[in-house]
Amino acid sequence: MYHIGLDIGSTTIKCVVLDEQQNLLYKTYERHYSHIVEKAAEVLAHVEEQYAKKQAVCLALSGSAGMGFAESCGIPFVQEVYATRIAANRYMPGTDVVIELGGEDAKILFLTGGTEVRMNGSCAGGTGAFIDQMATLLHMTPDEMNEAAKTAQKTYTIASRCGVFAKSDVQPLLNQGASKNDVALSIFGAVVNQTIAGLAQGRPIRGNVLYLGGPLTFLSELRSSFDKALGANGVCPENSLYYVALGAALYAQGQVTLPDITARLQDYSATASYAFHAPLFKSQREYEDFRARHALASVPFREYTPDCGDIHIGIDAGSTTVKAVAIDEKANIVYTSYEPNSGNPVPIIHRFLKEIYASCPGARVASATATGYGEELVKTAFGADFGVVETVAHFTAARHFLPDVDFVIDIGGQDMKCFKAENGAISDIFLNEACSSGCGSFLQTFAEALGYSVPEFAKLGLFADKPVDLGSRCTVFMNSSVKQAQKDGASIENISAGLSISVVKNALYKVIRAGSPEELGRKIVVQGGTFYNEAVLRAFEQEMGVNVIRPSIAGLMGAFGAALYGRAHAREQSALLSAQALETFTQQAKNVKCGLCGNHCQLTVSTFPGGRKFISGNRCDRPVTHRTGDDPLNLYAYKLSLLAKYEEGTGTRGTVGMPMCLSFYELFPFWHTLFTHLGFRVRHSSFSTRDTYLAGQATIPSDTVCYPAKLAHGHIQELAAMQDVDAIFYPCMSYNFDEGLGDNHYNCPVVAYYPEVLAANCPELAEKIFIYDFVGPHNRKAFPKKMAAVLQKYWPDITQAQVAEAAAAAYEEYVAHMAAVRKRGAEIIAEARKAGRHIIVLAGRPYHVDPEINHGIDKLICSHGAAVVTEDSISHLVQKFETRVLNQWTYHARLYAAARYIADKPDMDLVQLVSFGCGVDAITTDETREILQREGKLYTQIKIDEITNLGTVNIRLRSLFAALEQ
Amino acid sequence: MEQQLPAYPKFTKEMKHTHKLLIPNMLPIHWTLLREALVDEGYQAEVLTTTGPEIAQEGLKYVHNDTCYPALLVIGQFICALKSGKYDLQHTALIITQTGGGCRASNYIHLLRKALVKAGFGNIPVASLNFSGLEKDSGFSLTVPLLRKVISAVFYGDELMCLANQVRPYEEKPGAADAVVARWLRILAAQYDDKRGITKRDMRHNFAAIAADFAAVPVHYCPRVKVGVVGEIYVKYSALGNNGLEAFLASEGCEVNVPGLMGFVQYCVENMRETSKLYGGDTWTARAAGVIQEFLDTREDMMLAAIAKYPQFHAPMPFAKMKQMAQGIISYGVKMGEGWLLTAEMVELVHAGFENIVCTQPFGCLPNHISGKGMINKIRALYPSANITPIDYDPSATRVNQENRIRLMLSVAKERLQSQAPAKPAPLYGEEGTVQAHVERPL
């Protein structure tokens, strides 16, 4: 009897046929383009014709997309990892570890020394899909990417946590002109990191490693990246694509006939059931009315003639596209162009400008204005006169269509920007967090994965009868929602419509968090290339319950707005390169590593005619300005310097190591003094760097915990490796000091208990004394006794009196430390006022001072001319007040107090740093926003993670400063 | 500068008579009894049993999307109810629990109030159900008679749930176990009406009668995969929160063990003692906690004894013993959210033969980073047979992904069951005696 295994994954379908002796007779591997049931039936029909020929067979099904209908059709189902294990044991005995990457899943299977299977968590995203997505970004096929990686010279750091983050690292690299070969290899490196960090969770990958699944089969460079990272020589066996199908075939029991199964499949496909929305258009008529209405919002477009007068050029060098617009004195458009940005915008703009000169013979260019990611690059390369932050450019353009516009939403390729406007100024800005930046390129990736062009794909959805309800979260979740919908039998039309609706829902409920249309305003302009997609536009109007204006140049609004800005600010003559200068224009790019500080940024230096240089990839101004020394009006730098001044000392009782993470950023002065007074030498781990994270990443048990907590693992590694450290001290503390600002004085659960996680998961701690008892310095009276008891376990000669004395000094030191911070804060505020500088309260937690956590955002703010203070330097100036939430965490009470303090200070504004995954901040951000807005203040939030790209942060900050100026 | 916050409507004493209290569902059996307790104390109350995707949608609309899933669901369920037109909005109030711990959950009530204002229901009063003395000015108070009823309701709920879970997978007539539950809910409601069912004596009697009723259900034992469910309290218990996890496990042929609610209550009380032990200070609270614990222990003992009388039933570990299960793995200082209890429950389940465990948590749940996912490696190291899978729940986490992960855990479990079954016929059951006739020898 034949044994048939069918493996239906998220993107492909695999089938194998074995004979009685388990010889492989037939195998097939095909993309199913979401037509799962049809494809399965087709494959089975072929097997029936060639092999089964009406005989009974043993059949089993596997794969995530096959689960649903296996059940409904009564076909035996075997979980795919389990199937892999069966096949590995049969075909590659002696294998210790299997690494299998699929379309959307990553799995590690430990076969020896305690069988264990690990699958990626719902957040870590897919790997095959991720590689496809990255390849799309590079305008390559995955195979081409593999070829490119072979000749890579070096690798860049790319966030490995989830696809979307990686994308926001890759895009700027491309925009800065980094070599595609290097980026390709870096992407493979990110996949490797993601797999190891996300799945191994402390368990070492050793012995015979087996590579399975599509990406590892097809991409040799991915395999060698794994080999390198694991220090192993992994094997990609014969039939590596078919292990799941083979496992299913081996597992298959019971007898069925294929025609019977095919009939059941057909019945099944007729019964679609899933959550759905109302259709986008109920009738052709409705659609045509809709089109007619939107046709009204257009800009006059004319050919250039000498009576147009001077022209103004706007260039929008965006993340995925480059756009240029030229207008005449009356704002008529005389030239437009729009092209995908394949990495380096310079040659594209070069061509655009030549076209403008050619199509407007004799025209005098009065101004040229750049906006978008590549703004500075364009200014340097071509001598553009002005640079304007994207949000301002878009607002300027929107007002041209609707002077009293009160809400603008722009969904572009990678970003989503929206802002409210009041009295002609931007009053509230929402940019998508790194996590939901799906947007236009997200639709594109999906369309392409399903085998359509974007316009074709969008059109499919217009008349779908039951658009799938896909929820409103990040792309990774969306992938699995689509998988679920496919499983439930949703048609491609309904998936297309559902995706368009989910883009809108993401914008409204994830980014803006709107409750009702009234809240956002009734005069809405929508723009950005994504709104050319009529399905998205319609979904937006339906969701908002209001008709909106979509300008005919929706995709060019940034460039158009920039041109309008130039028209308003034009001086005599533009400094833009002349037609003649463009003829000899060249760009030379070179990669160097910056050595000016510990960050070691990868710099790309572009050189243009006349020796003009543009440096990108830098996180601070130093390589550009060569100014040494930090801005003195930066309290973040000062706080860090305070911590750095504590010395190891010469204690003889022993050496205690403390990890510079989480609570230590505030309590180090306390603990250092306590232990020093008790006669210990105190060492601490260094301030975090990216390497700190990488060193500890393999022992992180929860991949969704915040980045500051993840860094703790690296600090522990560093301390454990210090030979002279006798004990590592990192206490648990449910409570923090009561500063009288809130209803309670808790630490957040992660700060409070993370030492427990370290103790349970860091193998290197087994060789050291790890003191992680619960202590409560908040209770000054009881503390010495408790602390003495803790220490006496390891040093029995320590007396309670000694601890009491040391504690007294520690409390004094802590108070002095906080006083120093507050004093310097007050000085900075006074000095900034004298110098007429704006003051930004960069509000977060004490550990946000860590340069690897804040990614230099403090310095970035200073580079915009503002002074930076912290929330804890001003929170004591406020009395406890009523809040809308239970104010029960010490650190967070300071946030509210700081917001309250600045509410009536015209020269102070607050920017809140939020670590991705911080659950407490889901509460504090809304409350802080409310406190500020009640007094008419802007609220700005910056979400940070291991992500290192400051581009988006910069836009947000510049938008804030632009809004403050108005 | 003085910012005046508009006052939220309070739940006043008078509203007890004029307003209907809406209660979000979590545990169907327990909540039915709790409602009865409230009604007997003169409140008008209704448990919301609604389901459907619109609940999460409404939650997403009015609550910060990164807030934990339980908050999204509870608030979404309230707003759906208020929008449904079923209730007289002038005479409707909401009630929600507040633990007062260091986790986000203590803030649900505030998020709910914010959401109500945003959704245009700013006039609806919200009462807080808490044991921590928060919201003292509320007209809703846990009086001693109400408290005693609540405690008995939790015990009855735990016993019914525990036994139904043990009988249902093996019952000869489908629905038999649930029929016992339904009957007892009626009996207990009637007892409450007659001011009975809450004394020690009544409870002892009821505990025994409930166990006897379940023991009388004809069963047919066969080897089944045994799965324990632990996790964040709401997603662990609520079918709305965990996508019908128990039903899914049942459909996969598993026997499910969901540790009871009283454990969580005892854990909260125990923490009052631990806190003063760890940080010093307030010994009065610790002493009071000791008295409460004793009160609960006596009743727990009675319930466990009633169950243990029947050898075919597995009685859960007494709380005091379960507490010891966490020793050497996690400290008792971890008291936010489910804290050390979650770890202890996992170990208890392993000891009880439920070594296949689904550890449920809302996506990004803070305490579960520590006591759930954070401890799994250590538990596995100590108990190599532990087969634990952590599952995240979230408005957009799809059932297909969750079920796929659970299936993986079940594949391993089923394989073990097959290899173990012949050596160990029907573990824990099949003792000589009453049920022997029904035991079918495993494959």
Image (cartoon, coloured by chain):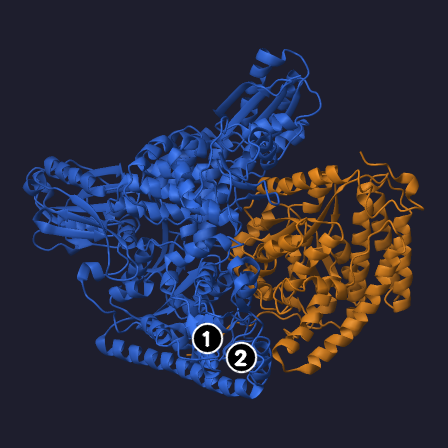
Residue pointed to by mark 1: A667
Count neighbours of disc 2 (C-alpha within 10 A) and say few if under 14, some if 14 to 19, many if 20 or more: many
Write down the quadrant of residue A798 in the picture: bottom right
Amino acid identity at mark 2:
Pro
| Count of numbered labels shown in the rendering | 2
As drawn, the chain in blue is A
Say which mark, if any, is on residue A777.
Answer: 2
Amino acid identity at mark 1:
Leu
In this image, B35 relative to A202: left or right?
A: right
Say which mark, if any, is on residue B150.
Answer: none
Would you say the residues marked 2 and 1 are in contact, meaning their CB atoms lie under 8 Å apart?
Answer: yes
User: Residue A485: x, y in percent?
Assistant: 55, 35
Q: Nearer the viewer, residue A508 or A51?
A: A51
User: Residue A419: x, y in percent?
Assistant: 36, 55
As drawn, the chain in orange is B
Count neighbours of disc 1 (C-alpha within 10 A) and say few if under 14, some if 14 to 19, many if 20 or more: many
Q: CA distance from mark 2 to mark 1?
A: 10 Å
User: Residue A205: x, y in percent?
Assistant: 50, 45
Determine whether the residue tagged by mark 2 lies in a helix, strand or loop: loop
Q: Is residue B234 above or below residue A828?
A: above
